[in-house]
């Protein structure tokens, strides 16, 4: 079965994420114990849209005892970390795939991600973007792979997928997709091209 769609993850794939940006620097600047930000309890799962950006912000402010200015600083640091920097070689390769195939993004995401990630113009090089917080499902739930294939208008076996999380890749394969674990860009591109050529 020919590969008719190429689907990529965003964080740590199309975007290079620098963990030195957040949250440790914020915790250090404000005298918070390491791990304090991650320990803040939320009332729901942001990745499936159970809480809003405003609710997340409020939880951080109350949980960490921050002022309004400090909370703004934390959120700015978070989004700077979340968006990262663009993996330009992978982006360029992906954009070229749209000349003869469907292209899509499947991302476990937080409310606000679509708006923040418009800086990279992903919507201009894809036929569809499936953000988990918008659809109420997240990887590795098999339903999100089914939904993505349906929205792209292809069969599962016609998709090749790149993600940095081995469990998400395993779930994609279990759903009938071809899938590759992303570690390093040139090797990932070579493996994707091999699958496209062989399928």
Image: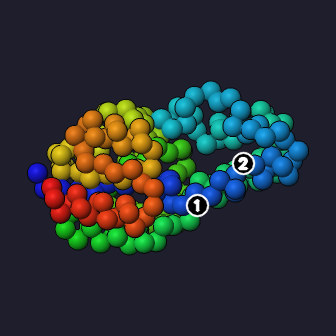
Looking at the rendered image, the quarter that the C terminus falls into is bottom left
Q: Residue 31, how many percent across, how many down?
A: 88, 44
Q: Nearer the viewer, residue 122 or 192?
A: 192
Q: Residue 166, how many percent across, how many down?
A: 42, 42
Q: Earlier in the sequence, mark 1 or mark 2?
A: 2
Crowding at dot 2, Cα within 10 Å, few <14 / some 14-19 / many 20+, comes out as: some
Task: Say if residue 124 shows up in the picture.
Answer: no
In the image, what residue occupies the spot 55% across and 49% down?
112
In the image, what residue occupies the spot 58% across and 38% down?
52
Judge left or right: residue 170 versus residue 117. left
User: Circle 2 — which element?
Assistant: loop
Label at residue 23: 2
Q: CA distance from mark 1 to mark 2?
A: 13 Å
Judge left or right: residue 196 versus residue 37. left
Q: Residue furthest right?
A: 31
Q: Nearer the viewer, residue 50 or 10?
A: 10
- Count the numbered circles shown: 2
Q: Residue 178, how many percent across, how many down?
A: 25, 48
Crowding at dot 1, Cα within 10 Å, few <14 / some 14-19 / many 20+, comes out as: some
Q: Which residue is mark 1?
A: 84
Judge left or right: residue 173 versus residue 71. left
In the image, what residue occupies the spot 51% across and 38% down?
47
Q: Residue 72, how many percent across, how many down?
A: 75, 51
User: Circle 1 — which element?
Assistant: loop
In the image, what residue occupies the spot 42% across and 72% down?
89
Tag 1 and tag 2, C-beta contact below 8 Å: no
Label at residue 3: none
Task: Say if residue 178 shows up in the picture.
Answer: yes
How are the colours assigned in the image? rainbow
Quadrant of residue 66 within the rendered picture: top right
């Amino acid at each position: 079965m020919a590969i008719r769609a190429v689907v990529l993850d965003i964080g740590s794939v199309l975007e290079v994420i620098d963990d030195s940006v957040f949250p440790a620097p914020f915790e250090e600047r404000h005298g918070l114990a390491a791990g304090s930000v991650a320990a803040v309890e939320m009332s729901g799962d942001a990745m499936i849209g159970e809480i809003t950006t405003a609710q997340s912000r409020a939880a951080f402010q109350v949980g960490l005892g921050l002022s309004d200015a400090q909370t703004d600083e934390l959120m700015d640091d978070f989004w700077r970390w979340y968006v990262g920097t663009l993996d330009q070689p992978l982006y360029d390769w992906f954009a070229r795939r749209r000349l003869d195939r469907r292209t899509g993004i499947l991302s476990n995401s937080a409310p606000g991600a679509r708006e923040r990630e418009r800086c990279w113009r992903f919507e201009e090089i894809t036929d569809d973007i499936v953000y988990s917080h918008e659809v109420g499902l997240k990887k590795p739930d098999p339903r999100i792979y089914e939904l993505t294939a349906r929205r792209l208008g292809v069969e599962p076996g016609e998709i090749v997928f790149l993600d940095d999380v081995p469990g998400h890749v395993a779930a994609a394969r279990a759903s009938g997709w071809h899938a590759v674990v992303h570690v390093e860009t040139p090797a990932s591109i070579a493996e994707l091209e091999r699958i496209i050529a062989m399928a």
